[in-house]
Image (cartoon, rainbow, N blue to C red):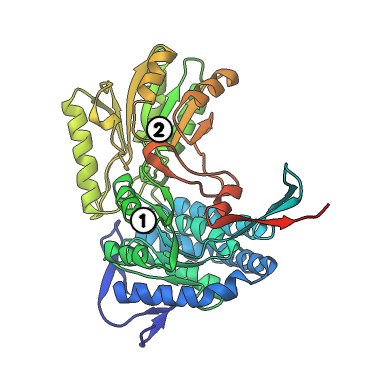
């Protein structure tokens, strides 16, 4: 790679960009703005390291990942503060993210030594079939800003466990966490070249260069459905193995027999984790008419009491990531109100310069309102009501998205029946959190392709092949 001073394999000379704290608008750091030449250099390093890394015993790969887990836990407070500064989320949210992110290293450290396979006799006799799994090759990993630690470990963990080398492009809003995680992997013993972080504001050029490079055999992307479609079209030119974790518009269902307190507690997590800036965030609230008044009163009271402000002030809800995000959420709510929705509860805003939007509860939302079709990505809960299950399922499944959903009911059989009828890859039943490293994370319809986490996450970075062996009998 090109000369000059380096931070975690990144040349810090030349053009730079600023990382800004969205809560204070202060500059947190200045980072090298890398380009296409750097992207190619990163693939050079990954390609050169692939043969050695793919032949590294699974136990050794496991040990490195487990050590990285230990180092993340050791540095949890520092990493949480870093995430909070570049992302804006509360320290509580950030600390929870670090723990969650570290668990992917631990999980895939355990999966690395269980690569799997199969052996069997051909039905016609005379041969045996030996099935194995091998690493795909050089993997391009593209991560978003909303969970800058968890989204990168959820991809790096299985890639390294499978024996792939990787090039990583974090979001320009939050590159510092990616660099910190990569530094911990180096401390854990990861060889040079196996992982390179490319920090850039030129995402399309960098990722495009990777998709054009015949040495890159895998792309794993987390981000918007619109960008995912573009990348899939580009990946099709070389038939690149693709995993896409895209947008969501999660419904939150409250049945007439639900425990109101449990439903409110679940809603606060499902809606306001990371200030609503999550692909799994509850966006559309479908509350049974018989329980709507009680739910809205209790949920609205809890929302109105949320503290909003910088993490340094101990606030529960931080800012939106940018001024553009603030304008977008403002527009979505204004349009909903113009269409007939009503603001029933709101939290107070701080006297601070950041991109803050008040946590808001909207009621009387028309069933055809645009807010029920868009991914809000902010601290806004849009509530509508339902009377029959057939009516409910028609409303819930009338969406191009199918990532997550939430169902609250006092009757477990009913909750499971509703959960199975929803077009979603993940359903939280009487709980407001669905993410777990041991579970296959992903969606259906326009919410993506493939799964992350669990055994399925490892398979995303492997190719299955078999040897047909002559077996005289």
- Residue 255 position within the rendered picture, expressed as x and y whole percent measured from the top left: 47, 18
In which image quadrant can residue 34 be found? Answer: bottom left
- Residue 427 position within the rendered picture, expressed as x and y whole percent measured from the top left: 50, 33
Farthest-out residue, bottom: 3
Relative to 190, 399 lies left or right: left
Mark closest to the chain's N terminus, 2 or 1: 1
What residue is at 46 percent from the left and 26 percent from the top?
422
- Residue 362 position within the rendered picture, expressed as x and y whole percent measured from the top left: 29, 28
**C-alpha distance separating marks 2 and 1:** 45 Å
Query: Can I make out residue 133 in this image?
Result: yes
Farthest-out residue, right: 473
In which image quadrant can residue 372 be found? Answer: top left
What residue is at 29 percent from the left and 57 percent from the top?
22
What residue is at 64 percent from the left and 64 percent from the top?
66
Disc 2: CA contacts within 10 A as few (<14), some (14-19) or many (>=20): some
Query: Can I make out residue 293 in this image?
Result: no
* Helix, strand or loop at mark 2: helix
Disc 1: CA contacts within 10 A as few (<14), some (14-19) or many (>=20): many
274 and 172: which one is in front? 172
On the image, numbered disc 1 is attached to which residue?
A: 235
What residue is at 42 percent from the left and 54 percent from the top?
147
- The answer to whether residue 292 is above or below residue 72 is above
* Helix, strand or loop at mark 1: helix
């Amino acid at each position: 790679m090109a000369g000059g001073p380096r931070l975690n394999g990144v040349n810090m000379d030349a053009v730079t960009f600023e990382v800004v704290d969205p809560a204070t608008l202060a500059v947190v750091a200045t980072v090298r703005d890398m380009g296409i030449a750097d992207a190619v250099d990163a693939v050079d390093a990954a390609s050169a390291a692939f043969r050695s890394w793919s032949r590294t015993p699974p136990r050794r790969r496991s040990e490195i990942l487990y050590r990285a887990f230990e180092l993340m836990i050791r540095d949890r407070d520092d990493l949480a503060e870093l995430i909070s500064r570049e992302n804006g989320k509360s320290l509580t949210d950030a600390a929870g993210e670090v723990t969650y992110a570290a668990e992917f290293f631990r999980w895939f450290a355990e999966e690395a030594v269980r690569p799997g396979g199969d052996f069997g006799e051909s039905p016609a006799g005379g041969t045996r079939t030996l099935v194995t799994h091998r690493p795909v090759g050089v993997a391009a990993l593209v991560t978003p800003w909303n969970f800058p630690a968890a989204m990168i470990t959820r991809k790096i963990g299985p890639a390294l466990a499978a024996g792939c080398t990787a090039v990583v492009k974090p979001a320009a809003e939050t590159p510092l966490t990616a660099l910190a995680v990569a530094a911990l992997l180096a401390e854990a013993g990861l060889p040079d070249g196996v992982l390179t972080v490319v920090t850039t504001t030129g995402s399309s050029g960098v990722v495009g260069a990777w998709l054009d490079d015949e040495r890159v055999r895998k792309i794993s992307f987390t981000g918007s459905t619109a960008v995912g479609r573009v990348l899939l079209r580009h990946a099709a030119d070389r038939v690149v193995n693709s995993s896409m974790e895209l947008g969501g518009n999660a419904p939150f269902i409250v049945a007439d027999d639900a425990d109101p307190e449990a439903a409110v507690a679940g809603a606060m997590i499902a809606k306001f984790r990371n200030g609503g800036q999550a692909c799994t965030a509850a966006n559309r609230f479908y509350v049974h008419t018989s329980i709507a008044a009680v739910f809205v009163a209790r949920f609205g009271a809890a929302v109105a009491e949320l503290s909003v402000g910088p993490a340094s002030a101990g606030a529960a809800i931080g800012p939106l990531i940018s001024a553009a995000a603030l304008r977008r959420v403002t527009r979505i709510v204004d349009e909903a109100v113009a269409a007939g929705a009503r603001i029933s509860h709101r939290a107070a805003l701080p006297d601070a310069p950041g991109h803050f939007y008040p946590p808001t509860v909207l009621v009387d939302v028309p069933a055809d309102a645009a807010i029920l079709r868009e991914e809000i990505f902010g601290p806004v809960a849009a509530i509508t009501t339902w009377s029959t299950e057939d009516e409910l399922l028609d409303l819930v499944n009338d969406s191009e998205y199918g990532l997550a959903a939430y169902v609250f009911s006092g009757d477990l059989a009913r909750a499971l029946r509703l959960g199975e009828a929803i077009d979603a890859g993940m359903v939280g039943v009487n709980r407001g959190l669905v993410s777990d490293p041991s579970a296959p994370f992903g969606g259906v319809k326009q919410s993506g392709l493939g799964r992350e986490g669990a055994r399925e996450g490892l398979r995303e970075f492997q190719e299955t092949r078999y040897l047909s062996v002559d077996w005289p009998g």
